[in-house]
Image (cartoon, rainbow, N blue to C red):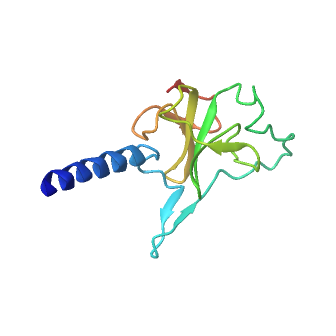
Amino acid sequence: MKSQIQWFALIALAMATSAASAQFVKGNEAVRVMADGTHKVEVPPLPSVALGSPCPAIKPGCAGGGWKMLESNSGLVECTEVFARPTTCRPSTYGVEKRSRTWIVKIKGQWMQCAQPDISGKCVSLKSLPVSAVQ
């Protein structure tokens, strides 16, 4: 009986770990694990031109072009813009709600947007038109 409980606990742990690992993009250079185990996360730099007021993530209709999925120090977030300015991001609903999403990642030193959470798929420069998919 004890071995069955341990077996079920092991399966539950494996499932939780695999679900958690789906919450990031493998190979994203914007996320670095430091020697002490902490994570250092970069976001795309603000452009040199002035931006308009940020559209808050809590306001309906602010993500008209789809949500921009970014890694943050608090985990995966969905944002109304790629720069992740204050108020423009909220906790991820990936895996819970189907939405149009673009994954913002750093590959070979360049900021890219990917249609899926996979850098081997369709990814284009942030300077290009967006690619998103309902997921």
Between residues 93 and 129, which one lies in front from this camera angle? 93
Q: Tell me if 89 is positioned left or right of 18 in this view.
A: right
Residue at image coords 51%, 57%: 31
| Residue 48 position in % (x across, y down) | 80, 50
Q: Tell me if 121 is positioned left or right of 42 in this view.
A: left
User: Compared with residue 25, is residue 37 higher up or lower down, i.e. above or below?
Assistant: below
Between residues 76 and 124, which one lies in front from this camera angle? 76
Q: Residue furthest front?
A: 1
| Residue 56 position in % (x across, y down) | 78, 39
Q: Tell me if 72 is positioned left or right of 65 in this view.
A: left
Residue at image coords 71%, 25%: 64
Residue at image coords 13%, 56%: 3
| Residue 55 position in % (x across, y down) | 80, 37
Q: Tell me if 118 is positioned left or right of 82 in this view.
A: left
User: Compared with residue 132, is residue 12 higher up or lower down, i.e. above or below?
Assistant: below
Residue at image coords 76%, 50%: 86
Number of numbered discs present?
Answer: 0
User: Compared with residue 79, is residue 8 higher up or lower down, i.e. above or below?
Assistant: below
| Residue 133 position in % (x across, y down) | 52, 25
